[in-house]
């Protein structure tokens, strides 16, 4: 099993930390992982993306030209990464952030209204965990137990009290994601 | 198995450098922040090793200060390191030459970015010449290690420690912005205590650590020598030492090369991209393999020379306009066609790009076995 994932959106949406938690979950599943950010003079509101690879085998290149799964959380990200998802792959997008949804017919497309859900519950900080939940529903690459274990390792101890809230958000994300037919 | 899973940590290459240094018993770090290696200093500041192992961590006022502090630490037989990125390493070249001239230990971590000049802050491998051939003056060599994973970033700090004291040659860990910034799982080493003053006195009789009760003459380290005959003698001694290092310390590895007819040569991040390119080529029925130098100096000349005729063509992949490729051509001595592919200025070639460059190299090799310098 090798899953090559790109997560892309605005800086501040929690793209990088979501990737990190996913990578930690991969370690808990005894897999090889790599996490490669597009780093640079990035800032809140600018674009941010991270490539996460989870595999049973040693990972060769952390830099990819095609992906199994793209999680796109703003319009420029969709435009950039929709064409480079492998045929039969998966695109997950946030319904609020994307004005023109994906059009490819040879991939599975999922919509998750995570932004709306986060706004509804008044907790915008769990946005990325809602999306992570959606990913785990669409692509069950790690169990929720391992993700929680990953959270425990990724977060400093003083933040461990927040884990139940994040776990709830992941479970909620699994409920609200839906497949879109194009 | 479960225990091992829990021992793994997810770290950036730069973070691994810092944590490894603390655990390998480094005595000091002197450095100045620069993207893409700032996490080295940041991680040291967060981990506060001065409270645990007693390691000194100092943000110097510049790269010049950093390298000269390393020079001073080396004189006293202490194990210290500095880290920087391309333009910062450029500033250090004078101090590096002095350290080499005085035959002092010291570790320099170089996390390359796009150049020349201030260039970009994106990853690059255009500092091969800077590390291997030196920007400092005079006849000197540095041992250059080239990690290609976060685990190897960690391990290289241990290897650098061993080599720099074994040979009294400064060691460069030549990495790049990708390996520095990416996260992978790492097993950190056990803690090795820092050496005591008594141990340094025993192991480094050359150290300028005060004659005190040690019952010996004072030591002096200076790169300045007024008598050219004496200086030449020093050069000869160093050259002999370099020959022994070349005989003993060459390190490399192959990927899928047992039955390969065509070869990629790459180090650092390019070797990771190269592995994936080999996988693609193999899927298309091309017998490709990869050779990866793990030490850039001493360079694995011998093995490349001995095996070159096995291959119909060699593609050097590096994120520069062509630096490693020159060493490969020297090693191969025209026995087979050698070509180059790489992006530069902060761009990184994807595996698919390397695949297409490889196909082009295969076509070219048929027509021009020799005369690679003709464009």
Image (cartoon, coloured by chain):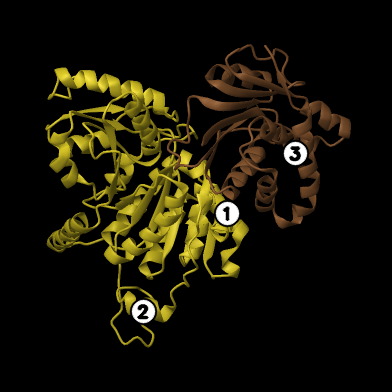
Chain colours: A brown, B yellow
> x and y percent of residue B35 in the render?
52, 41
> x and y percent of residue B347 in the render?
44, 28
Question: Which circle, 3 or 2, is nearer the viewer?
Answer: 3
**Same subunit under labels 3 and 1?**
no
- In 3D space, how far apart are the residues under numbered discs 3 and 2 (Cα atoms)? 58 Å
Tag 2, which chain? Answer: B
Tag 1, which chain? Answer: B
- In 3D space, how far apart are the residues under numbered discs 1 and 2 (Cα atoms)? 31 Å
The C terminus of chain A lies in quadrant: top right
Answer with the quarter of the image where residue A14 lies: top right
Residue occupying the point 34% across, 40% down: B267
Q: Left or right? Give the position of B299 relative to B10.
A: left
Residue occupying the point 54% across, 61% down: B57
Helix, strand or loop at mark 1 = helix
- In 3D space, how far apart are the residues under numbered discs 3 and 1 (Cα atoms)? 30 Å
Helix, strand or loop at mark 2 = helix
Tag 3, which chain? Answer: A
Q: Is residue B38 above or below residue A137?
A: below
Res A170 label = 3
Q: Name the residue under label 2.
A: B201
> x and y percent of residue A47 in the render?
64, 27
Answer with the quarter of the image where residue B51 lies: bottom right
Question: Which circle, 1 or 2, is nearer the viewer?
Answer: 1
Do the CB atoms of the residues marked 3 and 1 lie less than 8 Å apart? no
> x and y percent of residue B176 in the render?
43, 41
Depth check: B53 or A121 in front? A121
Q: Left or right? Give the position of B84 relative to A162.
A: left
Res B43 label = 1
Q: Left or right? Give the position of A108 relative to B20.
A: right
Depth check: B100 or B157 in front? B157
């Amino acid at each position: 099993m090798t899953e090559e994932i790109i997560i892309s959106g605005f800086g501040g949406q929690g793209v990088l930390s979501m990737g990190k938690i996913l990578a930690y979950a991969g370690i808990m599943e005894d897999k090889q992982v790599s996490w490669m950010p597009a780093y640079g003079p990035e800032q809140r509101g600018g674009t941010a993306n991270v490539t996460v690879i989870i595999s049973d085998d040693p990972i060769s290149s952390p830099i990819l030209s095609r992906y199994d799964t793209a999680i796109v959380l703003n319009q420029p990200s969709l435009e950039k990464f929709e064409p480079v998802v492998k045929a039969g792959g998966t695109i997950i997008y946030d319904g609020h952030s994307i004005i023109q949804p994906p059009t490819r017919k040879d991939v599975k497309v999922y919509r998750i209204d995570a932004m709306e859900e986060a706004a509804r519950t008044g907790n915008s900080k769990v946005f990325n965990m809602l999306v992570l939940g959606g990913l785990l529903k669409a692509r069950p690459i790690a169990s929720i137990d391992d993700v929680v274990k990953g959270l425990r390792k990724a977060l400093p101890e003083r933040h461990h009290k927040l884990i139940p809230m994040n776990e709830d958000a992941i479970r909620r994300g699994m409920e609200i994601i839906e497949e879109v037919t194009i | 198995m479960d225990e091992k899973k829990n021992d793994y940590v997810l770290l950036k290459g730069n973070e691994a450098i810092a944590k490894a240094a603390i655990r390998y018993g480094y005595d000091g770090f002197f450095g100045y922040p620069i993207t893409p290696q700032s996490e080295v200093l940041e991680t040291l500041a967060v981990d506060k090793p001065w409270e645990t192992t007693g390691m000194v961590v100092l943000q110097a006022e510049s790269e010049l200060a950093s390298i000269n502090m390393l020079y001073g630490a080396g004189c006293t037989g202490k194990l210290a390191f500095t880290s920087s990125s391309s333009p910062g390493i450029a500033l250090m070249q004078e101090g590096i030459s002095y350290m080499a001239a005085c035959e002092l230990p010291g570790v320099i971590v170089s996390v390359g970015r796009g150049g020349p000049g201030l260039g970009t802050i994106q990853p690059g491998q255009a500092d091969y010449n800077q590390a291997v051939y030196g920007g400092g003056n005079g006849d000197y060599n540095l041992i250059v290690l080239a990690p290609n994973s976060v685990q190897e970033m960690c391990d290289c700090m241990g290897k650098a420690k061993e080599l720099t004291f074994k040979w009294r040659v400064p060691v460069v860990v030549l990495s790049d912005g990708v390996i520095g910034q990416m996260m992978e799982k790492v097993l950190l080493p056990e803690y090795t205590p820092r050496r005591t003053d008594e141990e340094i006195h025993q192991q480094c009789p050359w150290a300028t650590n005060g004659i005190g009760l040690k019952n010996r003459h004072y030591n002096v380290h200076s790169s300045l020598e007024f008598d050219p005959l004496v200086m030449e003698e020093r050069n000869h001694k160093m050259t002999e030492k370099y020959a022994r290092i070349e005989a003993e310390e060459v390190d490399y590895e192959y990927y899928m090369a047992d039955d390969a007819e065509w070869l990629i040569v790459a180090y650092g991040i390019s070797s990771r991209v190269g592995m994936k390119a080999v996988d693609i080529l193999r899927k298309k029925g091309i017998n490709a393999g990869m050779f990866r130098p793990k030490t850039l100096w001493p360079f694995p000349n011998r093995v490349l020379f001995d095996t070159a005729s096995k291959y119909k063509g060699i593609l050097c992949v590096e994120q520069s306009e062509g630096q490693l490729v020159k060493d490969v051509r020297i090693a191969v001595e025209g026995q087979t066609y050698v070509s180059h592919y790489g992006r530069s200025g902060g761009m990184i070639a994807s595996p698919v790009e390397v695949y297409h460059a490889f196909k082009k190299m295969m076509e070219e090799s048929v027509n021009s076995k020799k005369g690679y310098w003709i464009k």
